[in-house]
Amino acid sequence: MIAKTIAPFARPLYVMLKPVGAICNLRCKYCYYLEKKDLYPESTSYVMSDGILEQFIEQYLNAQTMHEVLFTWHGGEPLMRNRNFFKHALELQKKYGRGRQIDNCIQTNGTLLTDDWCKFFKENNFLLGISIDGPQHCHDVYRRTKDNRPTFLQVMKGISLLKKHNVEFNVMGVVNDYNVDYPLEFYRFFKSIDCHFIQFAPIVERIDGKLATWNVPSEKWGDFLIAIFDEWVRKDVGTFYIQYFDSTLANWVGQQPGVCIQAKTCGHAGVMEFNGDVYSCDHFVYPEYKLGNIQTQTLTEMMYSDKQTKFGNDKQDTLPTQCKECQFLFACNGECPKNRIIKTDSGETGLNYLCKGYYKFFEHVAPYMDFMKKELLAKRPPANVMEIFA
């Protein structure tokens, strides 16, 4: 129960849910989250209890200042919980929602989708995020089962079921050392399956202090974005929506970007593990970034705490001089703090691993962004760019 009345805040409270923690039916080789189960060696099931679920939903809804509220279910693989769990969640949302508009989205690997799941999602207006790394030869490199079998055909079967039941979905493609060499094939594949909302997630991980072999090379990341942008800006503006491009344009016109990594500060999106532990961010689920537990503190107390505020402001406050003096700081803002793992040319720490790639991308797209900015300011559609640069 909320112990006290909460005053309105300047930004909405957003916390992602992990109903099965780090448990997953797949073993994607680059997954950064499976190791998180080691934080809870005493646990055996990693299943969120009904009590913690109810506490979260009540607190989350009571803390919101907007009429529209979004719940995001993540993993691990959230579909390892059965439909009764999500039916109960919907009942609790209705109980504590007080007439608010409540939306739900789930990020899933798609391999567990069935007709019954898709009927449920359609009936309850869920948005599905499907993790798929491009065409088969790209996807199957790293996205494997526990016994190392490929998963592409299973995911495509799931996507076919979503289409069959008219369930809204978007895709999130992880970009790694392999598929970064196939940008147009990657992009055109998503267009071929009629997915109009596309997100990219470049892999940058360290294992025992060393860069992972599957990391996307920085300059190749820039080349990847440029190749796709050049096709998108001539053919697909206003038809296919690519999160990086939309957020870049938002920063170009001085608006809040739609993705946290390109914002000036972070700390606006926490994550709650299966046992009620709340962490600063999905990419910072480490003991030093634990904010508390929902059973002893409210979500509002944790997410608006001095510790979380400092975590969010550190994104801007700890930028190296090279970033502060960069002409594209407004577009990049140092990207995600988890990727600030290399040194600048002068030896200063905290430079983003992907810096060279992003600089190359922003330099390339600047004329197009300038044009689309002028169109927006003149209250004309930015899709006019296609006529000019075709």
Image (cartoon, rainbow, N blue to C red):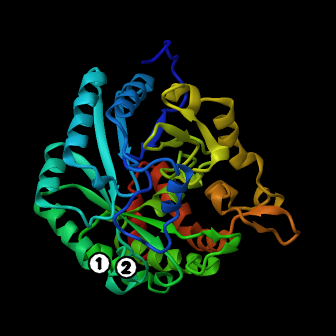
Give the vertical position of 286 relative to 102 (above or below). Answer: below
Label 2 sits on what residue type? His
376 relative to 240, above or below = above
Q: Which mark is residue 107?
A: none
Q: Nearer the viewer, residue 59 or 185?
A: 59
Residue 325 left/right relative to 5: right
Q: Could you tell me which quadrant the C terminus lies in?
A: bottom left
Residue 139's tag is: 2
Q: How many marks?
A: 2
Q: Mark 1 touching mark 2, by CB under 8 A?
A: yes
From the top left corner, tell me how far across and down residue 287 is, in percent. Answer: 64, 46
To which quarter of the image does residue 140 belong?
Answer: bottom left
Return the x and y of residue 282 as percentages of the image width and height.
52, 51
Q: Secondary structure at mark 1?
A: helix
- Which residue is pictured at 37% across the width and 79% down the height? 139
Q: Is residue 207 visible?
A: yes
Which residue is more in the foreground, 388 or 215?
215
The amino acid on which the numbered mark 1 sits, given as a three-letter code, is: Phe
Q: CA distance from mark 1 to mark 2?
A: 6 Å
**Is residue 4 placed above or below 39 in the rendered structure?**
above
Estimate how packed mark 2 is, as few (under 14), some (14 to 19) or many (20 or more) residues with alpha carbons within 10 Å. Answer: many
Q: Quarter holding the N terminus?
A: top left
Residue at x 48%, y 61% (from the top left corner): 34
Please tell me which residue is depicted at 27% across the width and 36% down the height of the picture. Answer: 89
Identify the element where label 2 is drawn: helix
Report whether residue 373 is seen. no
Kindly identify which residue carries mark 1. 152
